[in-house]
Image (cartoon, helix red, strand yellow):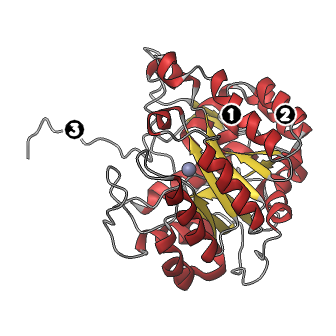
Amino acid sequence: MSTTETIRPPEYNVTGQDYQDRRHFRYEGPPLIDIHAHVMRPRNFEKPDVVVEDNVDQARTMLAVAEQFGIARTYSMCPPEDIPLLRDAFGNRLGFNGPINKKKEEPDEAAYRLLDRFLEQGIEIIKFWAAPRGRDRGLFVDAPWRIEAARRARAAGVRLVMVHVADPDVWFQKVYTDPSRYGTKADQYVPLCRMLEMFPDLTWIAAHMGGDPEHPDHLEALLERYPNLYLDTSAAKWQIREASAHRDGLRALICRYPTRFLYGSDLVTRPGLDREHYVSRYWCERTLWESDWQGPSPIQDPDFTPSEEGPSTPTLRGLALPPEVLAQVYRSNALRLLKSTADEHEPANRLR
Ligand SMILES: [Zn+2]
């Protein structure tokens, strides 16, 4: 071994945080529901059709950690063929959300067939992923085949649609620098508003704090204008960086609209992940929403530009949401929207 070799700290703990220290956790209500996660057989990131670990071991690890953090039920986006395996293994601890996608060259029928497979598996939500980087592949939130998929899902009794529009502001400065190809950040909301107006009887959940934790005033305008719009709190690194940076504005917004926010983690069961990876996300998310903890985020963040002398990760500044707001965000909003059976078969669960 070379003596110059440096041992890098793992991405899930660059500050040496003791994740067993949970004395700052404040929420003591009934178990949480995670509305946004990707629990599946781990797949190749580049080739999502290739299953790398043909088992549910990562899912078992993740859900065991979830339970330690008080999360009783997790809604997963996964390929339809994984749903029976996951149901067998985890029963009512999981619910399912079917992402409706198709390759650009595929006919619209491919999307409808996929929807049918999800409906056969009893999904409760459908997902339209429409990040700017999906435009090249035709993944617009209001593509005609998605409008038709929403109609068909509604006819089959699905009431909830999750959408991913926009991405962090810093990506529009660094990645999406060509607005003729990707549009501006504001452009991402035009098709979303079109869908909100076209389907006022569906409940729309805009993932990752509506894609705009950087602008609580924009989120407020959307929530005011569209009573069928809800926001999830998922994507740990993004929310740690930006919800902390816009702490007071976002906290005030959530307190003004406590019925419109849903807890989500955005955890993904990737091949070879260490248990501590899952621990780090749940720890940071609960710290961010319920406590007044403040310090450098323990999670490495490639989207954060450190100042010369400053810490290498963004500051996590807890929002310390009031208990009655947390109870809604963590649980009762999801229960109400899903009329879920989360209370049945719930594991005996202590939050600390
Ligand atoms: Zn996600």
Asked if ligand 1 lies within 8 A of label 2, the reply is no
Q: Amino acid at mark 1?
A: Pro
Q: Where is mark 1, residue-wise?
A: 191
On screen, residue 12 above or below 153: above
Q: Is residue 301 left or right of residue 207?
A: left
Question: Which residue is at the front of the view, 328 or 106?
Answer: 106
Secondary structure under badge 2? Answer: helix
Of labels 3 and 1, earlier in sequence is 3
Crowd band around label 2 with a 10 angstrom C-alpha radius: few (<14), some (14–19), many (20+): some
Crowd band around label 3 with a 10 angstrom C-alpha radius: few (<14), some (14–19), many (20+): few
Q: Position of residue 147 (x, y in %)?
A: 68, 48
Q: Where is mark 2, residue-wise?
A: 253
Q: Is residue 105 left or right of residue 29?
A: left
Give the foreground label among 3 and 1.
1
On screen, residue 220 above or below 55: above
Q: Position of residue 129 (x, y in %)?
A: 57, 46
Q: Amino acid at mark 2?
A: Leu
